Amino acid sequence: MEVFIDADACPVRTEAFKVAERHRLIVHVVGNAPVPVPHNDPRVRRVIVPTTPDAADDWIAEHIGEGDICITADIPLAARCLKKGAKAIGTTGKAFTEDSIGMALSMRDLMRDLREAGAVSGGPASFAPKDRSRFLQALEEAIQAVKRGR
C-alpha cells in the first residue's frame, strides 16, 4: 500500500505525511512544482511532472495500483484511480467509491455547465477546520480497510 498525493493546491499534505509515517507507508507527492515535503524521510518521494495539463493526474493514474490510496480534489482522477482498484479520498475527507463516483462526476459537469452559463458563480466552499478532521478520519479508515483487504 502506497499513498499518492495530487499535490498542487492540496491543503492536507502535512496531515497525510503524519498518518503515512505512523503506518510506515511510502508517499508519492506529485505536482508540476516543488511543494514542501518532510526532509530526510526516505518514504516520501517528490515527483515533479511537466506543466502540461493533467500531467500529475496521468502520472498518478499510471503508477497507482490496487490497494493504494490517492488523495485528490480532482474527481476525474479519483475515478481513474478507482478503476485501478485503488481508494480515493478528497481533500475534505470525502471518500470516493465505485457507488458514488458517477454522481460526483455528473455533479461536477453540471456545476461547470451552470457556471459557464452564468447561472452559478463561484466554486466549492472554502476549506474549513472540520474538513481537516474529516480528512484525517477518512484516510485512517481507508488505510485500515486496505489492511483488512476491503
Image (cartoon, rainbow, N blue to C red):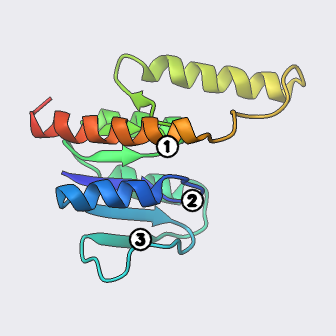
Q: Is residue 102 visible?
A: yes
Quadrant in the rendering for residue 96: top left
Q: Residues within 10 Å of mark 3 (few under 14, many from 20)?
A: some
Query: In front here: 123 or 134?
Result: 134
Residue visible at 24% across and 77% down?
42
The answer to whether the residue labelled 1 contacts the one labelled 2, judged by CB atoms less than 8 Å apart, is: no
User: Label 1 vs label 3: CA separation?
Assistant: 24 Å
Q: Position of residue 144 (x, y in %)?
A: 18, 38
| Residue denoted by label 2 | 8
In the image, what residue type sits under mark 3? Val
Q: Is residue 63 visible?
A: no
Q: Which of the two discs, 2 and 3, labels the residue nearer the N terminus?
A: 2
Q: Mark 1, mark 2: which one is toward the viewer?
A: 1
User: Label 2 vs label 3: CA separation?
Assistant: 11 Å
Farthest residue in the right direction? 118
Q: Which of the two discs, 1 and 3, labels the residue nearer the N terminus?
A: 3
The answer to whether the residue labelled 1 contacts the one labelled 3, judged by CB atoms less than 8 Å apart, is: no
In the image, what residue type sits under mark 1? Arg
Residue visible at 26% across and 37% down?
142
Q: Residues within 10 Å of mark 1 (few under 14, many from 20)?
A: some
Q: Mark 2, mark 3: which one is toward the viewer?
A: 2
| Residue denoted by label 1 | 132
Residue visible at 57% across and 41% down?
129
Q: Residues within 10 Å of mark 2 (few under 14, many from 20)?
A: some
Point out which mark residue 47 bears.
Answer: 3
Quadrant in the rendering for residue 29: bottom left
Q: Quadrant of the C terminus?
A: top left
Q: Position of residue 108 (x, y in %)?
A: 62, 26
Q: Position of residue 77 (x, y in %)?
A: 46, 42
Quadrant in the rendering for residue 18: bottom left
User: Label 1 vs label 2: CA separation?
Assistant: 17 Å
